[in-house]
Structure formats: C-alpha cells, structure tokens
Amino acid sequence: MTIDWKQYNPGDFYDELISTPGHPRAPARRLVSYLGSLTADEMEARRITAEATIQEMGVSFTVYTDEGNIDRCWPFDIVPRVIDKKLWDVAAAGLKQRLQALNLFIDDLYHEQKIVRDKVLPRHILDESQNFRPECVGFSPPCGVWAHICGTDLIRDRDGRFYVLEDNLRVPSGVSYMLENRAITKRVLPEMFDSYRILPVDDYPDKLYDTLAAISPRHQREPVMAVLTPGIFNSAYFEHAFLAQQLGAELVEGSDLLVGENDCVYMRTIDGLEQVDVIYRRIDDLFLDPEVFRRDSVLGVPGLMRAWKAGNVALANAPGAGVADDKVVYAFVPDIIKYYLDQDPILENVQTYLCDDPKQREHVLKNIDSLVIKPANESGGYGMLIGPHATEKERREFAARIRKNPRNYIAQPTISLSTAPTVTDRGKVEPRHLDLRPFVLQGLDLEVTTGGLTRVAMCKGSLVVNSSQGGGSKDTWIVDRKGD
C-alpha cells in the first residue's frame, strides 16, 4: 500500500507540501510523487534507516525532568519540508534587515540611548529589562556587532506568509541539528538529491568560522578559538561538542581557562598555556565571570569581562546582547527597523499585546482563553500558557501573574501554524504543525542559512514544537526551480 495523497487533508491550515487533497505545491511535486511511489514497507524501512543513522551518529539532546536529566536520541521525521528559493530569498532579506537593526539597537542602548530619548522605546521597558547589563555601558565590540549568531523563529499562518515569532540572541541553539538533519536525509532519500536542486546547508561551519575570525583581536591567519560549554549535563552539550569539532576549536569549560595578569585569556593544554583569541560562549551572561556577575558561578572564568573589555579576547555573542532577546522588545522591532534603517520591515511580527499597557492588558485578561501568554525571557516553550488548551484554574493563575508583574508578559493570538506531512506509523502520513529556525550570522558580512531547523509538533493537533516539550524535527529544503 502506498501513500494516498487524495486522503491527506490539512483542513484549514496552510500545508507546506500539499495545497488541497491530491494536489502538491509546485516546489514539492517531485518529492510527493516519489513518496507516493513507495510502499508502506519501504517507507518504514527508510524510517528505520533514519533511526539507525541517528544512533550511529550519536545525535542526542537532554531533557530536564524532576527525576533527573534524560539523554534522548534526536526525534526526526523523514519527510522533508520544501520551500521555493524565490520565497526564501525574500525571507532571508528580511532576516538580514532584522539582525542589522537589532545590532544597531543594542549598540545604541549601551551608548547614547537615542531610541529611548526619542521615545520610540519607553524608558521603563529598558529600566526593567532583565538582560540589560550596566557593565557593558560604553563598550564597543569589534565591528559594532553584539549578536553575531541569531536564531530567529519563523512561522507561516493560514495565508502562507512568513511571520517572525521571536528572536534568539543570547545563546541560540539548534544549528547542529539542522546540519545533522541534512546528513540523515541524504542517507534516507539519496535519490532526491540527484533530481532536485536543493541548496546546501553544510557550508555553515565555514561561514561561522569566518564570522568568528573577523572579530579576533590578533589578526592572524588562524586565530585560536574555543567553544565555552557549561558541561556534559547541559541540554545542548551535543551541539557544543559538534560545533567545536566543525570549527576546529577546543571545547572547554570554565576551569580550562584563566585570565593572566596581562588581561589575556589562556587555555590550559598538555603543552602549557595557549592564548585564546575568540570564545564562542554557550553559557548565559550571569555565569560568565564571577568577578562581575554571579559570585557563586563555577561555569565561567574570573576576569573574563576584564579581558574582553581590554580588547584581548572576543566573545560571541557579546555579553549584553540579550537586551534585545526579550519578548517585550520583540514587539518594538518593526519600530526599531524604521528608526535605525529608515525601512519598512520585510518580515512582519505576529500580532502582540503588551501586558504592561493597561488597555492591552485588559484585552488580554478578558480573552485569556483564546490567547497564548508568554513570559518575556523564558525559552524552550517553558512558562507559557496556551489559552485554548489550558484549564480554568491555569488561566486564573496566569491572570494573577500578569496582574502582579505585567512587564514580564506578552500575549499573542493562537496562531494557525502551518503543517507538513509527517510519518506516524507503518508508513502513514498525517499533518503536523511546525515552525522554522533559520540562523543569521553578522560579522563583516551578513549571512543567512539556506534553510534552518524545522521543528515539528509530533502529537496530533499540538502546537508545541520544542524538543524539550516532545517535538521532533525535519530536514528543510530550499529548492531552486530555475529551469524546471
């Protein structure tokens, strides 16, 4: 038995591969036709191949639970998501525009704060920011760039247009899974890479290297790089080790580094101390340097901020970049783009209500059963309320939290996330909701991945795509159909 695409019905949602039952979208026609030619046993064989490849490659992630940390194999679906290059080029231009404006915004906040003086961003939004670092005021990082790596979450609503759901500027994760998804898919569906012009993603490590090398204080051919990890119990440790290997960098913990009397950072090696030029840090600001931030941190390096401010080591992303990684600031990004670039945003935000505003807060409280409520600085799907799926008790509790600390919450409509065919059991496919996290690099140049990490809600009807909350993932194909 093969897939009967006439029986596949995404309903009212925008589906990435199928427009109406039995009718694939133009960029996906070859893929849909090929999958339709496979029997259920052949589909199952490919799914098993994917699982075996994941185990062989050791692709995993960690879930934090009350019972302890659980290491799990990466959840992967074999049916790729397909996007036309012409559409993607527009999205990529919007992502570049967004990061450029956000870096200008961050730099302004740590210097003259013109955007606050001109009342584009309310003063109290900055004053009550959890991620503004007074220790960074007056400092200018290399190239004026604070956020070198950004993971921006995109969704498509019923109209099929891309919208920005949020920006991740502190310690964005997931790019290793984007790369591994491609490697797995090449084993599972090798035939498709001969018949499609699928744009590559495997050049990302080279582009990341160039981005980091551009900010090295010592202008040598091969700067010494290190990936600073909290350690093996961190949920993204697989990614830290993967990227260190891809970059040719050392994977280090805070105890592997020290700051000398000359305010340079050194790495302990079997051959003695070696000066480090660039640190791709994967730990939060507050744990970076116990001399400056949390005194009890054992993850960071005493004196690291001193070395950074002296210009003897580069940090990516820079401390303080998280001031723009705030869901309240997110609501102002269209204004931020207009203010710094004098351009209209290419990519729109999802409609957002600020609970800090009395009128908007009143609307949120009255309609909490139909909205998604998010705290300003949580990630990974934690701490949010999906109104339509919540109990009355949960809604009351969230309403009380909003009244107590309105600055800490935003609300958005329950978005009709797009769907894509996803394998369920014995070769059967059903629609599942998904989002997309492309990665944007800014150093001397701006670069956007040709694709990204597609995250899938594996449970029927669920809108929660985070792997920590039971979501899975797909390979993302940007297809160049020129000449088709």
Image: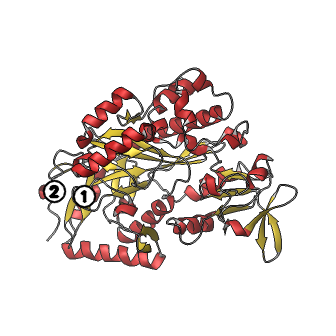
Residue 406 position by quadrant: top left
Left or right of 470 on screen, residue 304: right
Q: Residues within 10 Å of mark 1 (few under 14, many from 20)?
A: many
- Per the image, the residue denoted by label 1 is 421
**Res. 332 mark:** none
Q: Position of residue 152 (x, y in %)?
A: 46, 46
Near mark 2 (Cα within 10 A), the count class, few <14, some 14-19 or many ≥20, is some
Percent position of residue 70, x then y? 43, 74
Q: Amino acid at mark 1?
A: Pro
Q: At 31% across and 73% down in the image, what residue appears?
A: 46
Q: Is residue 229 above or below residue 270?
A: above
Q: Which residue is mark 2?
A: 8
Front-most of residues 12 and 129: 129
Give left or right: position of 309 versus 173: right
Q: In the rendered structure, are the residues bearing label 1 and label 2 in contact, judged by CB atoms less than 8 Å apart?
A: yes
Residue at horizontal 26 percent and vertical 46 percent from the top: 387
Q: Nearer the viewer, residue 71 or 121?
A: 121
Classify residue 192 as left or right of residue 393.
right
Question: Which is more toward the observer, 69 or 101?
Answer: 69
